[in-house]
Image (tube, grey):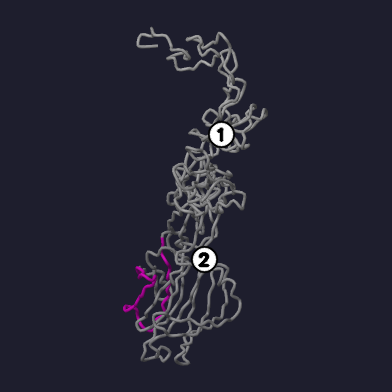
Amino acid sequence: MGTNCDTSCVAGKFGAGCTQRCNCASGTCDPFTGKCGDGCMTSFSGAFCQVPAVCPIGYYGPLCSLKCHCKDDVSCDSHGACSNGQCALGYTVYKNGSCESCRYSSFGADCNETCNCPEVYCHFEKGCYGKCFVGWLEPTCNTELPVYSGRPIIDETNDTSVIVRWRPWDTDFGDRGDGPVIGYVIFYKKSHDRDWSDRIDSTNVSTQFTVKGLASNTEYELSIAAVRPGIGGQGRPGTIVGFKTRCSCPSALDSPIIFTESPKQMIINWSTPSDDNVTCPLTHFNIFYFEVGSDSRRSHVISDVNTTTLTINNMKTYTQYAVEISSSNKDCEGPKSSTKGFTSEEKAAPPIVAIVDSSPINLHIGTNNLGIFGNIKYFNIRYRQDTTGDSNWISDELPPTRDGSAIWIGHHLTQDKLYNFKVSVENGVGSGKWFEFAVTLKDKGKDTQWSSSFLIVGFVLLSISVFVNIACCRRVKLTSRKLNQRMCISQDIQPKSTNEHIYETTLQNTNDSSNIYMTAIFK
C-alpha cells in the first residue's frame, strides 16, 4: 500500500489497498492472497477462509456469493428461497427455487408483464425503452393502440370522389386496443400499389367522409384506422375494402350539321370528341330532335360509335327542327350540343285565296304558315278576261308579309266582266301548284249579289291527294282571320278530266241569302 505501493499491509489485512480482512486462526495471512497458513478462525471456511458459516442477509450459496433477490431484501435459505416467498421486481422462480431475472421478453413483478418490443430493448424490471412493436404506443409500449376491425361501407362513387362511412370503434363489436378514440384516419391507395400512398386525418369522431381527388375509372382500396389521444396514438389500418371510381363524362361534341338531299328528309352529321378519354371509351351517341316550338321530342340511340351520320325520313316539308346530340360511355352521358335547321322545300301546294270584295276585286292570299309552302319568296298572280281568242295572261308578283299572306286589289279591272285567275306560291324550288278560279265582277249598284261588303271565298289546300279523294257533297265552315267573319261553302264536285279537277262551287254569304257561282280549277 502507500503512494508508491511500497508499504506492506498491517497484520490481519490483505489485498488491494489492504481492505480485506484475514479470517485466519493466527490473525495473519498472505498480504496478497489472504491465504491462511495455520487454518481458519471459527465460523469461517474455505481455501482463503472467506466463507462464513452463516451467509449475510441477502446472500446464499457455498461461498455466500449468490444474491437472494428477495422482495424487500429479506434473507433467503442456502438454496436461494426467499423467507417471504416473493422475489424482487424483475425476478421470478423458475426451476431451482431461487429468484432469477425475467426471461423471454417478460418484466415486472414476478415477470408477469410482457414487453411489446424486441427482447434486446426489454428491461427485466421496467420493460421496453423504445422500438415498440407496431400497434403499441411509444416509448413504454404498454398501451395498445386502438384497432378498428369493422368493414367500411362505400355509399357513393363518382369519377373523382367516394363517400365512405363506418361504425364507431367499440370493443363490444370486436375492436381491440385502449381507448378513448378521438378520431379516425382514412387510408386509400390504388389497388395495384403496395403501400398506402394517401391518408386523410379526421380530427373528430364523425363516421362518414368524402374522399376527393381520385382518378376516374380506377380501382382503389380503402381502410380505416382509429386514433387515441397523444403523440403516435393512431392505430394500424383495419379491414380493407375495394371500390372503383366511375368514368368521367365525355366532353361535348361539336354542334351537329343538318342538311337534306330530298324533301321530308333530314341528315344529321357529327364528329367524335377530340379529347375522348381512352380509359372510358364511348358506348353510343344520343340524338334528340323536335320541331321548333313543339314539346314532342323524338330520339335515336346510335350504338356504333364509328357512325357519325343519321338519316331521318318522313319529316315535315320545310320545317325548322332543333337537333341535340350527346355521347355516352358506360357510366355517364356528356353535355348536349345543339343546332337548328330546316328540311328541304318542295313544290308548294296551292295557296289559300279569299275573295273579300268584287268592286274592285279584293283578294286575300295566305298560307297559314304551313311548311308545305316552303320559304315563300312571292305569290304569282295571273289573270285575264274570259273572252274568246284572248290567251294573254297578265302577271303580278306579291311579296308575302311576315305571317305569309298578301293582299291584291284589282282597281283596273272592268266591271261586269268575267275574269280568270291563277294564284301560286313561289319558293326556293320554283312556282308551286296553281289555284285557278273565275269571277264575274259586278257593280254594287246593279246586282244585289255583292251587297255585302265582305264576301269570303276560301279554300285551304294542304295536298292534291286530299281533294282527289273528296267524292261527296260536304259543307265546310271557314273563318277569315283578317275579317273575323264566318262563311259557309257548299261544294258539288264534278271532275271533268283526268288532268284537272273542276269544282262548281256555290258560295253563300252568311249575312244574307244571296248566292254567286264560281268555277275553281286545281291542277
Most foreground residue, 58 or 475: 58
Seen in the picture, residue 417 relative to 99 is either above or below; the reply is below
**For the point 57% across and 34% down, which residue is it?**
74
Which residue appears farthest toward the right when viewing the image? 95
Which is more N-terminal, label 2 or label 1?
1
Seen in the picture, residue 165 relative to 53 is either above or below; the reply is below
- Check residue 57 for magenta coloring: no
Most foreground residue, 84 or 35: 35
Q: Quadrant of residue 426?
A: bottom left
Left/right placement of residue 225 relative to residue 361 reads right
Query: Does the image show residue 460?
Result: yes
Residue at the spot of label 2: 296
Left/right placement of residue 44 relative to residue 508 reads right
Q: Residues within 10 Å of mark 1 (few under 14, many from 20)?
A: many
Residue at the spot of label 1: 90
Q: Quadrant of the N terminus?
A: top left
> What range is drawn magenta here?
398-427
**For the point 45% across and 74% down, which residue is it?**
352
